[in-house]
Amino acid sequence: MRSELYHVTLIANAWFLVACLASVILTIAMGIIFSKNITGRISELIAGARKVSSGKYERIRVGRDSDELSELAATFNQMVDDLVRSKHYSESILESMSDMLFILNSQDLIEQTSQAVLRDLQYSQEELLGKPLNLIFSADTDLVTLGTKLKQQHSRGFVADVVSKAGNKFPVSVSTSLFRSRNGRTSRVMVVKDMSEYKKRVEIEAVAKIEKEKADQLTALNEKLVTTQVQLVQTSKFASLGEMAGGIAHEINNPLAIIHGNAGAIKELAESPDADLGLVRLLAERIENTTMRISKIIRGLRSFARDGEADP
């Protein structure tokens, strides 16, 4: 009886030990599985963060569990979505800029460009990335001065010429700005504005100004010429009048002398008691004719004076 009871007790203890061992093994196995699950999810978060830091904005798997790692994964994905939206917004700004924009590294090598650069210079993005600035600026550009300006916090007003891939050369105005990221990395922003239209407008305005000055000078010379011409005409008239006055004086003096002589003869006849009336009549007719001659001369002078009023 005792041996049977002992045997049963021994079997029960054995099963208890087996159950305990199985429980321990199960617990260890579950711990290993749970640990691998956590490790895998953490590794996935780390890999996702590394992709984001390298510029690949990819979401990660959240998982079905409602634990801290799932919440962390959801927050990570929200951050990725925000970064993607911010990246698209920045790219849309760069694409909409009419001026050319370059992002340069600390060695002044091209890191990024706007669409305006590719459009105006006819390069592809790959042809420009990592290249120095002498690729786009003309050979006569003072790159030393430009390099000095790039090291300043802000600079503007640097004028130079850029050359497209096809060899087309056009004037530009360069403005630069220095900035540092949160991790202390230094970059430079260079905005290049095409000045071709402005230069053409300035040249046109300069030519128009010169033409206006020439026109003003010609107008002044023409006015002076007209004034001089009027003065010459007046001087010529005065000279002609002087000559004519001399001729008129001669023409009038002769009739006056005749009148004077005939008048004296009539006076003498009037004092004589036996005056010849026929002779008096003849002398009177001579005076009358001479007076008419003088009157004709005066009418001619009046007609000349009226014609002269219309002249300048």
Image (cartoon, rainbow, N blue to C red):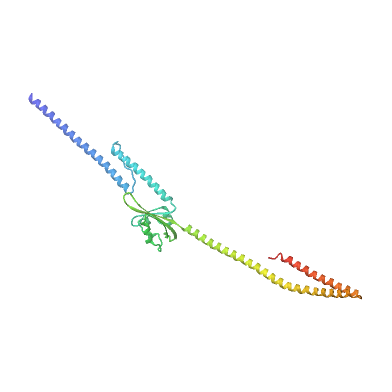
Determine the residue positioned at 40% across, 49% down: 91
Q: Nearer the viewer, residue 281 or 296?
A: 281
Q: Looking at the picture, how far across and down is residue 284, in whole percent?
A: 86, 72
Q: From the viewer's perspective, is residue 53 above or below residue 252?
A: above
Quarter of the picture containing the C terminus is bottom right
Work out which residue is located at the far top of the displayed protein and give it.
1
Q: Looking at the picture, how far across and down is residue 244, in whole percent?
A: 73, 72
Number of on-image labels: 0
Work out which residue is located at the far left of the displayed protein and give it.
2
Work out which residue is located at the far right of the displayed protein and give it.
274
Q: From the viewer's perspective, is residue 71 above or below residue 10?
A: below
Determine the residue positioned at 33% across, 42% down: 77
Q: Looking at the picture, how far across and down is residue 71, in whole percent?
A: 31, 38
Q: Looking at the picture, how far across and down is residue 94, in whole percent?
A: 41, 50
In-image side of 172 versus 299 (left or right): left
Q: Quadrant of residue 85?
A: top left
In-image side of 165 versus 233 (left or right): left
Q: Nearer the viewer, residue 206 or 277?
A: 277
Q: Nearer the viewer, residue 9 or 240?
A: 240
Q: Nearer the viewer, residue 271 or 77?
A: 271
Determine the residue positioned at 21% across, 37% down: 31
Quarter of the picture containing the N terminus is top left
Q: Quadrant of residue 302?
A: bottom right
Q: Quadrant of residue 226?
A: bottom right
